[in-house]
Amino acid sequence: MTTDSGAGPEPGGSGPGEDVTEGLPAGWVRATIGELCDVNPRGFDEEPGDDDLISQVPMAAVEAATGRMDASTQVRYGDVKNKSLTRFQENDVLFAKITPCMENGKIAKAQGLVGGRALGSTEFHVLRSRGAVLPEYLMHFLLQRHVRRAAERHMTGAVGQRRVPRPYLAELEIPVPPLAEQHRIVAKLEDQLAHIEAGEAALGLAAKKFEDLIQAVRSRGVWQADEDSLPDGWRWGVVGDVLEGIETGKSFTCLPRPARDDEWGVIKVSAMTWGEFRADENKALPLEREPNPDYEIHSGDILVSRANTVDYVGAPVLVGATRAKLMLSDKSLRLVPKVGVDRNWLIEVLSSRPVRSQYSAAATGTSDSMRNISQATVRSARIPIPLEGAEQKAVATAIADTMSLVSPLKGQLDEQAREAVRLRNALLYSAFTGTLVLQDPDDEPASVLLDRIRAQRAGGAKPARRKRAPSTTAPAAPPTSGRPVPSGTQEALPL
C-alpha cells in the first residue's frame, strides 16, 4: 500500500528561478536534468527490425510511488512502429507528465524490457542519462513527494489535462554526488526501502481485508435483496429514480496553485476519493474569470468523480464542512436527491461494490490514467430501493453504527501508513543531502566527470545511432524485483 501524504523533510531540488540550497558535501555539484540527460530523445540507440519483439508499457504498467514497472507485454515492432507512442530503452527513466499520474508518482527506471526497448504511453517524459547520473539515483530523486509537488505547481493546461512541460523538467536542478557515491547511495536506499515496502505490503493486505469487512457490512444493509426476493416496502430501480437531477461544472484554465481563502477555486480530480472530500485539492481561478455561484460546493452536497483514475472514477462523497468559494469542475458531478431521500443511504448505495462494478464496467477511456463515466451511466446503475425515507435512514444508521465499531482499526492502519511515509521521506532526505552513506575523498568529484562528458559531447564523441539491432525474439525478461504489478500478455495493452 503506497500513501503519498505525511510530513517530512524536503531537501534539494529547485525549479527554474527558484533558490538553490547551498552546503553540498565535498565532491558534489548541482546540475540540471538537461545537463545530465537527454530529455525525450528521438528514439532508440539501435533501431529494431520489423520482426523484433519489444515491450509495450502503458501508463497502468507503472506503479505509483514505487519505481516499479511491468515490461512483460511484448509486441512485434513492425505492428506498432508507426503509432504515436513514446520510444524508450533499457535504463531510461520514465516520468509521467499528466495529472494525476505525476502527482501519484508514476516514475520508474525502464528495466527488463524485451530486447532492451519499448513503446509506451505518450504521457511519459523520457530521461536518458549521459553517464554522470545513475538512472536509479535520478528515479529516487524524482519520486520524492516535494519534487512532485513543485512540478505540480509548474503544470500547464486545463483542469484534468494538466502536464509538466519539458522545459521545466530539463531545467530542474538536482544534487549530484560522485558516481561511486551514487552507487553506494542507491544500494543503501534500495536495501532500506525494501524493509519499508515489506511493511507497506503488509499494511496493504490489512487494508484489503478491512475493505472486505466494510463491504460486507454495507451489503448486509443496502443489498438486502436478490433477483427473486425483496424486503417488504422495497423495489428494484436505478439511481436515477431517487435523483431530482445531476449538475456538473465547467472546464477552467486555473492558476498553478491552490486558491487562497479570499479567492475562488476549482476542485481537482484528486479532491474526491472514496468517502473523502479534500477541499485543499483545488486550483485558484484567475481574477479575470467571473465565478458562477451556481457551481459552488456546499456542505451536504453529494459529489461523484466523473473523470478520474480507474480506481477512483465514480467515487462518491458526502461533503462535510468545507470552505466557501469552491466550485465544481467539469470532472465532477453533483447529485441532487429527491425530497425524502436519505443522503447517507444514497452514499452507502453509491459506495457499494455492485454499483462500483457497474460504473467501472461502463467507464470509457483508453488509459487507466483517466477514465470517464457519463451522467447516463450514473443514473442507470441498478439498485434495490427502500421506498420509505424512514427505512432508508434506518439502513444508513445501522451501517453507521457497525462502522463505528470497526473504524478505530482503520485509524490504526492509516497512522501506520503515515509512519511508513515519514520513514520513506526521512530516508530520501538523508540520501540527497549526503548523510545516508559516508563520503570517500578518493572518489572522482562529480564536477570532473561532468566536465569530461561535456567535452566529449562538444567534440562530437556521442556514438552514432545505428539503424537496427539484431533480431530479438526471445521471451521477455522477468519483471523487476519486488511486489509485481499485473503481468501483461502477448496482446498490446491500451496506452
Image (tube, rainbow, N blue to C red):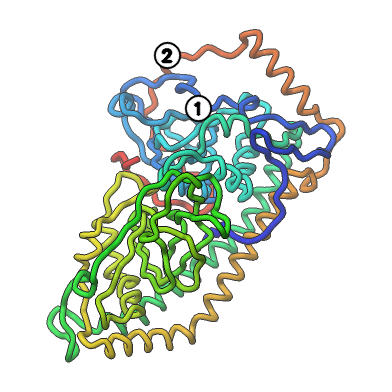
Please give left or right for residue 281 compared with residue 274 in the image.
Answer: right
**At x 59% / y 58%, what residue is drawn?**
197
Instruction: Choose between 334 and 361: the one closer to the eye.
Output: 334
CA distance for labels 2 and 1 = 19 Å
Q: Residues within 10 Å of mark 2 (few under 14, many from 20)?
A: few
Amino acid, disc 2: Lys
Label located before the other in sequence (2 or 1): 1
Tag 1 residue: 40
Q: Look at the image and tell me in which quarter the C terminus lies.
A: top left
Residue 105 image point, x, y percent: 53, 48
Instruction: Using the image, determine if residue 291 lies above or below residue 132.
Output: below
Amino acid, disc 1: Asn
Tag 2 residue: 467
Instruction: Using the image, determine if residue 289 lies above or below residue 386.
Output: above
Please give left or right for residue 12 compared with residue 111 in the image.
Answer: right
Q: Answer whether residue 70 is visible to the viewer in this image.
A: no
Residue 369 image point, x, y percent: 39, 48
Image mark count: 2
Instruction: Using the image, determine if residue 142 lies above or below residue 380.
Output: above
- The picture quadrant where one finds residue 154 is top right
Q: Secondary structure at mark 2?
A: loop
